[in-house]
Image (cartoon, coloured by chain):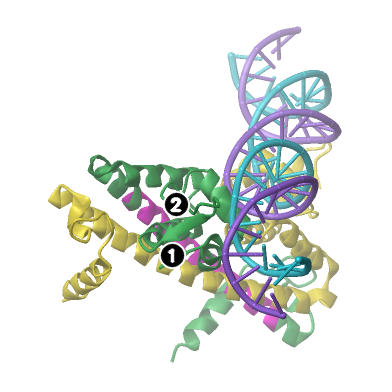
Chain colours: A green, B yellow, C cyan, D purple
Amino acid sequence: MIYKIGDIAREMDVSVDAIRYYDKEGLMPFVDRDKAGRRVFKENDMNFIEVIKCMKQSGIPVKEIGTFIDWCMEGDDTLNDRFEFLAEHEAKLEDEIKNLQENLAFLRWKKWYYKTALDAGTEDIHFLPGTREVDPNERKRYEAELKNNED
Amino acid sequence: MIYKIGDIAREMDVSVDAIRYYDKEGLMPFVDRDKAGRRVFKENDMNFIEVIKCMKQSGIPVKEIGTFIDWCMEGDDTLNDRFEFLAEHEAKLEDEIKNLQENLAFLRWKKWYYKTALDAGTEDIHFLPGTREVDPNERKRYEAELKNNED
DNA sequence: ATACAACCTGAAGTTAACTCGAGGTCAAGC
DNA sequence: GCTTGACCTCGAGTTAACTTCAGGTTGTAT
């Protein structure tokens, strides 16, 4: 089975132009061409495409992915480099996920803040009396309500 | 308690220039100035700073954060807009986290791939005999090993 | 046979989010 | 009184990752 650039773009969920850009930046040294000069991707190339897609989505810059792919082309001498690269980015991704989960918790508390304000018809319910300053205890009130709903 | 731009930069973990940029882009209409023209952040401003930090880290573009902050300045008429904004980004963030977790799982399988290759001294152990094409069964072998280690 | 969609290249353009440089103000410490 | 560090503005420069444009080739369906 072979694939054309459009198939790859669909598979990676990016534009055809983006694929050409990746290729130009050295992410696809494995790609063949047909006699008209069109890119032809083989079945085994899909392993690389999967790797590139994953790394892109994980926020690894194109140049770094290029380094990794270069190593893949060089053979067994670079096995350790590749392993360390992955281990490093595994750790980074773990951190990022943890951070995003904290951000998500924060967004949820703010959502509660606005839901309750909306129910009351005004944000005043969260302010210190007579001011427009947020009562520092409101967050605790939310956390308590959260715990309460865990039954 | 009041804070200066350097304090805010440290708190948000970005450069002082970045804070000035955010301000210029309309993210900080609440900030006061001292008589020398220096930015002065009040205790209540820290609520906004927290929101901005969270949204930035969640990947929300500066312009969109600006829209949200504008709504905050406008009062109770925009409560619903703000609630919907948060609900929308909550959903996006949930999706992104799910996606990153899948990417993390993929990175881990690739790490296993290279660890085993490293132990064997060659990537050949993952190739179909006589080729340089990855054996499609290798991933299943990894998954099986994963399950096995769950004891 | 001709239209059309899908592919190609090279070069220029775009956008977001900073970053840097030049030139200046101000308060505190020596 | 003078230096130093933290702040200021304005405007230009940078970078990554595409995107768009102009002009051209192919293979297939009507």
Residue A9 is one of the magenta-drawn residues = no
Residue situated in front as seen by the camera: C9 or B107? C9
Q: Which residues are magenta?
A: A87-115
Chain ID at mark 2 = A
Q: Residue at x 31, y 47 (%)?
A: A82
Q: Nearer the viewer, residue A13 or A114?
A: A13
Q: Earlier in the sequence, mark 2 or mark 1?
A: 1
Q: As displayed, is residue D22 above or below residue A111?
A: above
Which secondary structure type mostly characterizes the magenta part of the structure? helix
- Mark 2 highlights which residue? A32
Between the residue at mark 2 and the residue at mark 1, the CA separation in whole angstroms equals: 10 Å
Query: From what the image shows, is residue B151 above or below residue A27?
Result: below
Q: Position of residue A108 (x, y in %)?
A: 58, 75
How far across and how far down the image is residue C19, in percent? 63, 34
Residue A116 point in image, percent of width and height? 68, 83
Image coordinates of residue D17 in percent, x first then y, are 59, 50
- Residue type (three-letter) at the residue carrying disc 2: Asp
Judging by the rendered image, the residue that carries numbered circle 1 is A2
